[in-house]
Image (spheres, coloured by chain):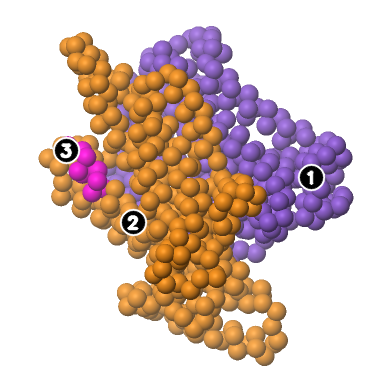
Chain colours: A purple, B orange
Amino acid sequence: MSTDTTTSTDTTTAPRHELVYFALRNRKLVIGLSIVGFLAIVAIVAPLFARSNPNAFVGPPMQPPSSSYLLGTTYFGQDVYSQLVNGLRQSFLVGVMGGGIAFVVATAVGFTAGYRGGAVDEVLNMLTNVLLVIPTLALLIIIGGYLKGTSIVFEAVFVGATAWPWAARAIRAQTLSLASRDFVGLARLSGVRSWRIVVGEVAPNMSSYLFLTFILLFGNAILISASYDFLGFGPPNGVSLGNMMNLAFAWNALQLHVWWWFVPPGIAIMAIVGGLYVTNVGLDEVFNPKLRSVS
Amino acid sequence: MRRYFARKLLTYFLTFFVAVTLDWGIPRLMPGDPIAGLLAKFQLQPSSYAALHSSYTKAFNLGEPLWRQYLDFWWALLHGSLGTSIYAYPDPVTTVIEHAVVFTLALLLPATILSYLAGNKVGAIAARRKVLDNTVLPFSYMLTATPYQWLALLLAFVLAGVAHVFPISGGFSYALVPTLSWAFLWSLLAHWFLPFATLFLVGFGGWAIGMRNLIIYELDADYAHFLESLGAPRRLVRKYAYKNARLPQLTGLALSLGTIVGGAVVTEIVFNYPGIGWLVLQAISSEDYFLLQGIFLFIIVGVLLANFVVDVVYLLVDPRTRIGLQGGTR
């Protein structure tokens, strides 16, 4: 979203190097980013070096973690470590795709409603409020009954199509307040097209806010897809963190005390999502000078 | 105030309308023959397949023209009929759901309300003490990032599977006959505790973080600085900050109702707790589509009612909505 406009702003007046300076000094940002970054690298690299296919039966069933099976084996004798790193990759993929789709829908709806106003706003606002109330999981329940073999793309599209309303509402509110500013009025007077005003004048002035929204949507997408897979609606034979918990539960890992089957995927999700939340707060403090003294 | 409520109610009625339409439309929108899809999962003889296919067609009312099917669906719904359950044949879907709703409400209401109240209190206290802030905050972030089903699995494993402090599954001990006896009530309570704790803990983290951050924002607002410069005691400033911070938290509560319900569904499944969520799993595994449709509507109606309650509370807490100033009408 780099543009040549030089309008003065609330949040991005600070020169680049100043932002970097505050970013490196912000403990929350550094911790959050390191966690997410580390897991992202693991998700990209580790599956390449995992010794086995995640669904392959490599050893005796229900082996506790040991030197030969780093995180033990499942009820069926599959390698938990291999499943974990592959599942991590799936989670990031669904998070980026689902969060990305939700973000695109949210910005489209939010900008249009906030900038156009009038009847368009009324209709879009009503649509947002209606979808906001319908719980994602409930919707999944009636759709899931009919699905035969979903894919990770379907999952991302579903998450993206249902997770956007709160973000659209927040972006609409921000756009509303920016649209009444003088510099937007000036652009409008000089005959700039609406979409160029939105992209060139409105969006850059809330770019930090948009970025924070994307991070939250990303984290939410990972959490939603974990529930989705836990209910057994995930891709058949798919390896995901939610699916690991589903299978562990279904095959009595609780009663058989096979804790290494369901503990690692939960920790992984908690670390990604928690890392994203902490990054979000840290970035907020970096972008917003008012908050810096607090940390 | 009347405008505020009129808008809210319009949204809720529209939501209900959309939800019913989706509930009706999704089986019909699915590509291919929905009934063939449902029946493909059973392994049937050709003769029984034909019989079942025609009875399903009749049950779903698929022989009629579409507009007729739609109106009939509403007609049946307004007369309180959601069809017959396959899982609990021949009970009507409404009866099956009614039995489960009691358990879900007994979990959801206390867990939501208590975690909201406790989270807000602890968050507000954390915002004023550095030591507390440094311990409560990381802990809260971990809790709010935890998937419900994982915390449920963990608690079930540690406190029920290994330590045997609590029962691991069910709504009450199956050795007991449901009566109003101490033994039975105790059994209910023991089975209720872990699912409740799961929902409470995940919710608590989010509310504590929200309140802590909002108070810090509020303390930086002009009115707070003004009060301070007038020499008002810090306690008073904090009190005003807390009162203002409650409003966005209430909005947040309304927004997160869907997530909370979703959390209850997966938590109940882990503990085999016989509420709506557990029923979802039974309905899925027995291909009971009428039951799923009914559960969907029940959840929607529940969330709508809860939203309405939050709106009323908002009205009580925010005086601006009462005298018609802007504020609540977001």
The residue tagged 1 is A64
Q: Nearer the viewer, mark 1 or mark 3?
A: 1
Region in magenta? B311-320
Which label belongs to residue B319?
3
In-image side of A73 versus A129 (left or right): right
In the structure shown, which secondary structural element does the residue marked by tag 1 occupy?
A: loop
Res. B27 in view: no
Q: Chain of mark 2?
A: B
In the structure shown, which secondary structural element does the residue marked by tag 2 occupy?
A: helix
**Which residue is situated farthest in the left direction here?**
B323
Looking at numbered disc 2 in the image, what kind of residue is underneath it? Answer: Leu
Circle 1: is it few (<14), some (14-19), or many (20+) Cα within 10 Å? some
- The percent position of residue B321, horizontal first and vertical second, equals 18, 41
- The percent position of residue B330, horizontal first and vertical second, equals 27, 40
Q: Main secondary structure of the magenta part?
A: helix
Closest to the observer, B185 or A241: B185
Looking at numbered disc 1 in the image, what kind of residue is underneath it? Answer: Pro
Q: What distance separates the C-alpha of mark 1 from that of mark 3?
A: 60 Å
Which label belongs to residue B210?
none
- The percent position of residue B322, horizontal first and vertical second, equals 15, 42
Looking at numbered disc 3 in the image, what kind of residue is underneath it? Answer: Pro
The residue tagged 2 is B304
Q: State yes or no: discs 1 and 2 in contact (Cβ < 8 Å).
A: no
Q: Nearer the viewer, mark 1 or mark 2?
A: 1
Is B315 included in the stretch rendered in magenta?
yes
Q: What distance separates the C-alpha of mark 3 from that of mark 2?
A: 23 Å
Is B23 included in the stretch rendered in magenta?
no
In-image side of B330 versus B173 (left or right): left
